Structures are given as structure tokens and as C-alpha cells.
Amino acid sequence: MRMDVLTLFPEMFEGVFTSSILGKAQEKGIVSLSAVNFRQYAGNKHGTVDDTPYGGGGGMVLKPDPIFRAVEDLLGRTEQGTVPRIILMCPQGETFTQRKAEELAREEHLIFICGHYEGYDERIREHLVTDELSIGDYVLTGGEVPAMVIIDSITRLLPGVLGNELSAVTDSFSTGLLEYPHYTRPVEFRGWKVPDILLSGHHANIEDWRRREALRRTWLRRPDLLERMELSPKERQWLEE
Ligand code: ADE
């Protein structure tokens, strides 16, 4: 899979793309990540990529031409037959979720467009992008951190990226529930003990306990998630207790 980012600050991506799991995923050839400065497509000697808004008002607006040309250059270099999704990072976009990460992880090629401080000329939205994504209801200084968040969550879903394949499947949200509590050694720390059931070696009881704790935690912290879940009669009973 290939993911390209168009940004005025490609240096922000350096450590993120080369470290830890993303770095290893690239070394293994599972994913190829790049950050491209779209200022090089400005087409003027000052490298101007923004301008004042028609109709007046404050702030600057990203011009369509450099962004269109940057995307078209990437498309020209795309393997024949693959049609990339072109994703605009903005607070007005659809809120990114684990479900969206799973959907995007099935694509061959994604292009992310990141604005910084400015708005986008509306023709970018109308005639270039296929998706608009937000990472939540708050405003950041630019789309770079949101693009990193999304690229990270997609990469870890790609087959072969996580050492333990199970971990992406049992994640919070993939199961529809928050995760159950985890413990490791020592069995007693400052007087706080690991629940006996986890030491019992009884796998069926442990699975039951984990499912019950995941339900309990979801009910306490994120009851909205339970509204969309199909629960077994036994699980409904647990919630009523
Ligand atoms: N750009 C600024 N804020 C953003 C957000 N919350 N999500 C995506 N892009 C953004």
C-alpha cells in the first residue's frame, strides 16, 4: 500500500514515518509513505500557494492550482489501474473512526492533503477530493497531525505489520467494545493483587471474565457504543446486574 501526503511541512513527518512500527512496516515493504511539499508546484518564483479570499474577510485561502498539479503529478506516477482516494484533512470532514480505518486499509493508494492555518479554495473540495476527514470536534493548526493519526491507524491494520496478528482484532473498537483490563507480573504490587480468575488457568472462565469486564467498562465510559451492538441474552443479563 502507498500513502502520500501533500503538505507545506514535510519535515513534520520525518520521525513519524521512520520510527517504530511505521518505520518497520516500510522496511518490510508492506507500506510506502512519503511527504511531498506542494509549494514546489506553486508555478511562480515566490512559491506562493495561498491568496486573499474573494469577497473579503480575514485569513488566507489555499489556491487550487498548486494542489491540483501536485495531485496530478502523483497520479501520473501511479501504477496503471489503481485509482487513489484523495483525502482532504479538515475539521468539517467526516469524523474518522476505527471503521473508516478498516475501510481505507483495503485501498491500494491514498493521497492526503493538509492545509495549515488557511482554508481551501472550494474547487479543491468539489472537483479533486474523494473524501474529507476530521479527527474530532476541535481545531488544530493544520492537517499534518490528523494525517499522521490516520496513517498510523491504517498502517497497523495491514497484514504483517503487527507482530501479534491478534492484537488488531481484539483492539478496542474493532470488537465494538473498549478493551478489558490487562495485568502482568508481579502478582501483587504495593498490596494491589491481580484478579484470582486470571491466575486460575481456566480459559473459558477467563474469556467470560474478560468479555464481562469489557462490557462493564464500555457501559460505564462509552454507553453510546453499546447502542449499536448485538448482545447475547447472557451479556444483557450481566449489564442488568
Ligand atoms: N485541521 C485542523 N483541525 C483538524 C481536525 N480536527 N481534523 C482534521 N484536520 C484538521
Image (cartoon, helix red, strand yellow):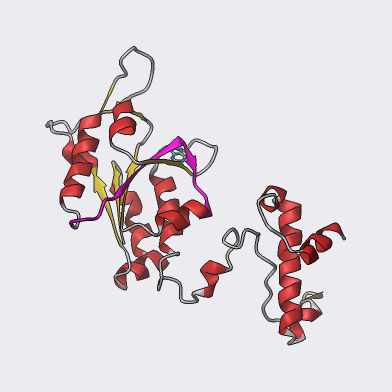
Quadrant in which the C terminus appears: bottom right
Asked if residue 96 is among those painted magenta in the image, a careful observer would answer yes
Magenta span has 119? Answer: no
Nearer to the camera, 123 or 32? 123
Residue 109 in the image: x percent, y percent? 30, 55
- Give x and y (percent) for residue 223: 72, 50
Q: Is residue 197 visible?
A: yes
Q: Quadrant of the N terminus?
A: bottom left
Q: How many marks?
A: 0
Where residue 238 appears, x then y in whole percent? 82, 63
Q: Which residues are magenta?
A: 80-98
Residue at 67%, 71% (x, y): give it.
Answer: 182
Query: Between residues 89 and 20, which one lies in front from this camera angle?
Result: 89
Residue 206 percent location from the top left of the image: 73, 78
| Residue 49 appears in the picture as rendered | no
Q: Nearer the viewer, residue 94 or 80?
A: 80
**Residue drawn at point x = 69 percent, y = 47 percent:** 224
Q: Is residue 173 above or below residue 194?
A: above
Is residue 121 left or right of 173 when viewed as pictured? left
- Say left or right for 191 vs 84: right
Residue projecting furthest to the bottom: 201
Q: Quadrant of ligand 1?
A: top left
Task: Note whether 100 is above or below 167 in the view shown.
Answer: above
Residue at (35% x, 60% y) in the render = 17
